[in-house]
């Protein structure tokens, strides 16, 4: 099992965020860069798989200041040597897919082939509708049509990105994109015909290609967080993408893992239960159970209950038939008791992991980290205890 860290780059402590407009403070942003650098360098030295950053815009509140995950990848990648860096995830519907492919390829070249990539449909209309208004995402009065458009764009953009990475030059004719557009005459046709490709006999563009390519024309590991529906999990496995789930109810999670097996089988891959699947939880380890719980109460739970709960993310801890908005309290106690937050001493966390991985073995585990909501000294101690006393019991990747 590979182990990585999934950052939602909070800037500021709980108290600083509650003061208001933390996202606009340079001092807090610089603290975030400093703290995550130290954490990344520690993981780099101890065999962790990678670090990933989400994409969100306009987070003036300070809870997820991750405007451009590819730029964050490059920043932290330049300060490490071995660990992979990537996105969990780029929100594809509002993006230009060719530019996404180009930017990840540039970053991969600069880091010598250490990029992975993740893709998502997006759920925050404050920025998704603003940035995607030119392609119809501003109109979400018809909720079903809005979600269908996001799915269409997601799948077509994914297809374009893979074409750009896999081919020297390519074309694409889809519902939303024509690449290249028709009747583009190229003044340097003779030169491109001599030194490149993608030109018709009469001097028109027939194909385009990104430059540079991915490092040594490699394909990066691909991830899809957060996969919750069976259909999205099946799609991911059919397309050789690792679905990353946060579903905690044993019955729901087990069914999602079965869907992953079924999706792989439909693509001609015979995988074991949990093979090719990723999972994410927030994990906080301290020297005692009491200390770990006190830290956990003011860490991810503050963000989860205030910023994720209103968007329906408590579906991650809901049992079949429960309404994530009304069936149970939106509290730390709920997400702790239902397993979204795993906290305790090394012995306690070992016992919780043993039970979890016995039910749900997986190939990738992503630790949700809300940096700065967990003080840096406590965060580094948590890494140390996990590395020395927990992860060696479950994976041979951590040294």
Image (cartoon, grey):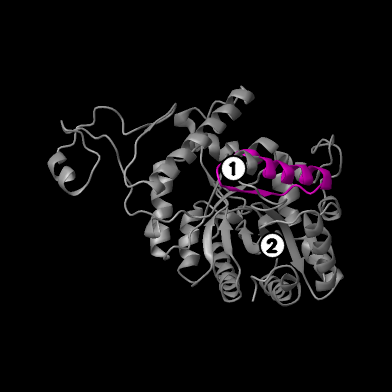
Residue at 43% x, 53% y is 104
Q: Position of residue 274 (x, y in %)?
A: 71, 52
- Provide the secondary structure element on which disc 2 rests: loop
Considering every residue shown, the one lying at the far left of the view is: 190
Residue 78 left/right relative to 231: left
Q: Position of residue 44 (x, y in %)?
A: 56, 72
Q: Which mark is residue 373?
A: 2
Instruction: Say above or below: 128 vs 395.
Output: above
Q: Nearer the viewer, mark 1 or mark 2?
A: 1
Instruction: Say above or below: 235 vs 398.
Output: above
Residue 371 left/right relative to 152: right
- Provide the secondary structure element on which disc 1 rests: loop
- Front-lying residue, 185 or 381: 185
Q: Earlier in the sequence, mark 1 or mark 2?
A: 1
User: Which stretch did the figure color magenta?
Assistant: 233-262
Residue at 39% x, 43% y is 98
Q: Position of residue 21 (x, y in %)?
A: 60, 52
Tell me if label 1 and label 2 are in contact, CB under 8 Å. Answer: no
Residue 294 in sight here: no
In the picture of the structure, the residue carrying the numbered disc 1 is 268
- Front-lying residue, 255 or 102: 255
- Front-lying residue, 217 or 261: 261
For disc 2, the neighbor class at 10 Å (few under 14, some 14 to 19, many from 20) is many
Q: Is residue 234 magenta?
A: yes
- Front-lying residue, 42 or 124: 42
């Amino acid at each position: 099992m590979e182990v990585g860290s999934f950052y939602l780059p909070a800037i500021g402590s709980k108290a600083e965020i509650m003061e208001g407009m933390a996202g606009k403070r340079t001092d807090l942003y610089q603290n975030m860069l400093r703290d995550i650098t130290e954490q990344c360098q520690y993981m780099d030295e101890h065999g962790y798989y990678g670090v990933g950053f989400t994409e969100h815009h306009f987070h003036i509140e300070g809870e997820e200041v991750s405007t451009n995950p590819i730029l964050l990848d490059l920043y932290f990648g330049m300060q490490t040597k071995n660990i992979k860096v990537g996105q969990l995830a780029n929100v594809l519907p509002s993006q230009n897919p060719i530019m996404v492919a180009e930017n990840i390829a540039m970053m991969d070249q600069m880091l010598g082939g250490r990029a992975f990539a993740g893709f998502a449909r997006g759920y925050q209309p404050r920025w998704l509708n603003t940035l995607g208004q030119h392609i119809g995402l501003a109109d979400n009065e018809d909720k079903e049509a809005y979600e269908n458009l996001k799915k269409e764009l997601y799948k077509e953009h994914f297809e374009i990105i893979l074409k750009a990475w896999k081919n020297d030059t390519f074309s694409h004719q889809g519902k939303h994109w024509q690449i290249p557009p028709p009747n583009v005459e190229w003044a340097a046709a003779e030169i491109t015909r001599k030194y490149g490709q993608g030109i018709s006999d009469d001097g028109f563009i027939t194909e385009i290609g990104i430059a540079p390519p991915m490092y040594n024309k490699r394909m990066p590991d691909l991830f899809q967080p957060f996969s919750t529906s069976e259909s999205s999990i099946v799609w991911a496995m059919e397309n050789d993408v690792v679905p990353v789930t946060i579903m905690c109810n044993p019955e729901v999670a087990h069914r999602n893992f079965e869907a992953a097996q079924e999706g792989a089988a439909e693509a001609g891959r015979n995988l074991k239960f949990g093979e090719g699947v990723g999972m994410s939880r927030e994990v906080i380890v301290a020297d005692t159970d009491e200390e770990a719980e006190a830290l956990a109460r003011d860490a991810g739970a503050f963000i989860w209950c205030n910023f994720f709960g209103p968007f329906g993310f408590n579906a991650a801890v809901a049992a079949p038939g429960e309404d994530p908005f009304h069936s149970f309290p939106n509290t730390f106690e709920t997400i702790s008791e239902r397993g979204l937050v795993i906290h305790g001493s090394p012995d306690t966390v070992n016992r919780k992991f043993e039970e979890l991985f016995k039910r749900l073995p997986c190939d990738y585990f992503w630790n949700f980290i809300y940096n700065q909501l967990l003080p840096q000294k406590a965060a580094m101690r948590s890494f140390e205890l996990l590395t020395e006393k927990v992860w060696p019991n479950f994976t041979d990747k951590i040294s």
